Structure formats: structure tokens, C-alpha cells
Image (cartoon, rainbow, N blue to C red):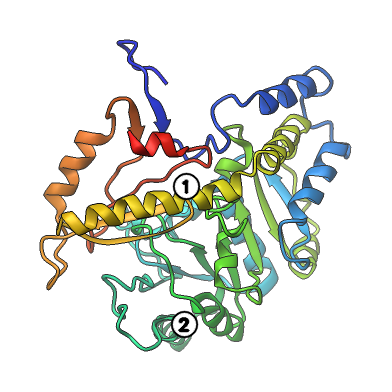
Amino acid sequence: MYDEQGEEYIDCINNVAHVGHCHPLVVQAAHEQNQVLNTNSRYLHDNIVDFAQRLSETLPETLCVFYFLNSGSEANDLALRLARQYTGHWDVVVLEHAYHGHLSSLIDISPYKFRDLDGQKEWVHVAPLPDTYRGLYREDHPNPAEAYAGEVKRVVSSAQAQGRQIAAFFAESLPSVGGQIIPPAGYFPEVAKHIHKAGGVFVADEIQVGFGRVGKHFWAFQLQGEDFIPDIVTMGKSIGNGHPVACVATTQAVARAFEATGVEYFNTFGGNPVSCAVGLAVLNVLEKEQLQAHAAHVGSFLMELLRQQKAKHPIIGDIRGVGLFIGVDLIKDEATRTPATKEADYLVSRYFFFKPVAFAVCRALTDKGACLLPLLPSTVFQGTLDL
């Protein structure tokens, strides 16, 4: 990557170029398909079937219906429509500081955005972020997962007391905008119980965190255990390595309820042959180059480097992450965990472009922390981190 003066950088910022910029196999797949058929022909194409099949192999069997779109925002908007049609309800529960997309429907369910705009709609209900470092229930709590899930139950009960009905709980499987939060083990299964009891569905937003980024698992929601299966999963960003590809995966029951409206779902560019060819190529590269295992290995290496720095610098309060989803929380003192906001801002301006590496360093815009966010692509290598 080069700036306007021709200075060279290694790009460790981009969380979309999942297998690297212009990977030869991805470029080749797009080029070859472009020469044959490059638009949605309104007929079923082998590429869309093959891509759906390959994605299904990474997901639980019940998530077997796929809708292809062009962006993560489109995917989350469709997930909201699916949830409302299936449940017959309207309201949504989200987490503090959440961001789910730029469409009007998604700004409404994104506290990160609506707090600076028109405010919270009556049909949106916000639950506490399951943050065990700064939140209501911290690392010394005997069961933070159950306690935070209890907060969701409280939010749901409060909504129902006002005559509201819950259609969905939306959450990133690992909340990123809120500060690279790692929910305590067992949190999502407990939340799902409360949401299902209220007649809603669980939507796992994997747009930033999925597709092998967390290393051990292909999808971040799988960190919550094999028995936990969302009703709807949304994906985007890295799925096309920068090409506009996104997807919603759901169950047959949800899809049939949506189909029963008689209003056919159609997307002019979603699922076109080129996009699906690109998506297949990205999956092939992930598998061929073992990038999921690589993310786990390099992530562990980076976490160890950060722990070494924490031992030297008391300003580092918390280091948290899994695979290549990592956050560092800066504090003024350990006793109060007061965010070191000025210092965080300085580091952002100082290291956003630090030769010869352009790091992904930015500050989480919350009122609770000053967390630096290294969101790194799967192709980061150890030599880069040693620089």
C-alpha cells in the first residue's frame, strides 16, 4: 500500500481484504466468470448453488437456507425483515454501543449511531454490553454469563409490560464497535432462551468477526459452544475479500414464513455469478492456505507480545481477544479503570500510519472505555508484528 508520497506500507488495517489485496486466485475467479456471464440472469446458476453448499458446510445443519446480497447492511436489513415476518412481532433487543449497518432500519437498532441522531425508537430495547472488564458484572463475578443474560431478560420483561412484543435479539457474535468485547462463555445460549420464550429469534451478526477470523472456529458464535445455534446468521465484508458480497443464512422455518408473504425476495446484483465465484475463491484460499489456523497462531503470538507490553506499562489495563480479533484497553489507574482517553487518542494519531506498517489502531467510541482496536486480516504474518 502506498501513500501520496510513494511511501510503502504493509496494510494491517483492512478487515475486508481477508486473504490479502488482489489475491491471484480471487482475481482469476472474478476474471474468468466476467468473461462468461457477469450479471444475474434471473435463472439459477451453478455458482450460487455451489457457494451456498460450501457455506452450509461451515454452519450447523439447521442453517440451510441462504439469501445473497451485496453488503452487510443489506444482510442485516433482510434479517430484520425475516425476524418480523416469522415472529409476527416488531421490537428488537440490541446491546449497548452496537452498530449493525447504515440503512435507516439499521441506524434505528444501532445505539452507536442513533444516540447522536434521533435517539432511541420505542420499539428498540437496549441491554447492557456483556463486558467483564468495565461492565456491570466483572471478572470476579461467579457467573457473569447468567447475570448479563438476566439483564436481557429484564429488558424483555420491561418491554412486554408496556405491551411490546420482541421479534429479535441482534448482536455481533463478538461486539467490535463496543470495544472488542468477548462475551462470557454461555452468555448467548442463556440469552437465546429468554428471547425464544418471548417469541423472538436470535440474530448473530458475523459481518466483521466471522469467516475464520477468530481462528479456532469458522464463525465467532461457535465460541459459545456447539449446542448454541442462532436462528439467523448474517455475513459480509471478508466473505468477498472486498468484492460486494453478503449473505443471510437461516432455517427452513424462518424462510418458509418469509416465502408465505407471497412477496418474492429479489436482489438485482445479489448472488450474481461473479460475486459467487469470488466468494468460492475466498473459501478456497482460506482452506488451501490454512488461514483459519494461521489466524489462531498469529493471534496468539500478538496476544503474547501485548502481554509483555502490559507487564511494562501500567496504562494497559486489559488485553482481550481471540484469533485476530484483539483489543487493548487503556486506563489511568487499575483501581478505578478510568479510561485513558487522551493517551488513546494520541496513539491513534501516532500509529495509524507507522512505517513500515499501517496498523489498525482506532479508539472505540464508547462512554465507558478507551480501547484500541487492532482488527487484522487473516494474512498478517509474524514478521510484520515483530517490526
The total number of labels drawn is 2
Residue with the mark numbered 1 = 298
Task: Please name whichever residue, 337 or 82, is drawn nearer the observer in this view of the structure.
Answer: 337
In the rendered structure, which disc, 1 or 2, sits on the residue that comes first in sequence?
2
Q: Quadrant of the C terminus?
A: top left
Task: Please name whichever residue, 139 or 196, is drawn nearer the observer in this view of the structure.
Answer: 139
Q: Position of residue 243 (x, y in %)?
A: 61, 32
Furthest toward the top, the residue is 5
Judged from the image, the secondary structure of the residue bearing numbered disc 2 is helix
Q: Quadrant of the N terminus?
A: top left
Residue 113 seen in this snapshot: no
Residue at horizontal 32%, vertical 15%? Answer: 7
**Number of residues whose C-alpha sits closer than 10 Å to that of mark 1, classed few (under 14), some (14–19) or many (20 or more):** many
Q: Which mark is residue 358?
A: none
Label 1 sits on what residue type? Val
Residue with the mark numbered 2 = 156
Q: Disc 1 and disc 2: Cα gap in Å?
A: 40 Å
Question: Height in image: 6 above or below 84?
Answer: above
Residue at horizontal 30%, vertical 78%? Answer: 138
Q: Nearer the viewer, mark 1 or mark 2?
A: 1
Q: Position of residue 19 (x, y in %)?
A: 58, 35
Residue 174 seen in this snapshot: yes
Question: Height in image: 10 above or below 100?
Answer: above
Judged from the image, the secondary structure of the residue bearing numbered disc 1 is helix
Q: Position of residue 107 (x, y in %)?
A: 43, 53
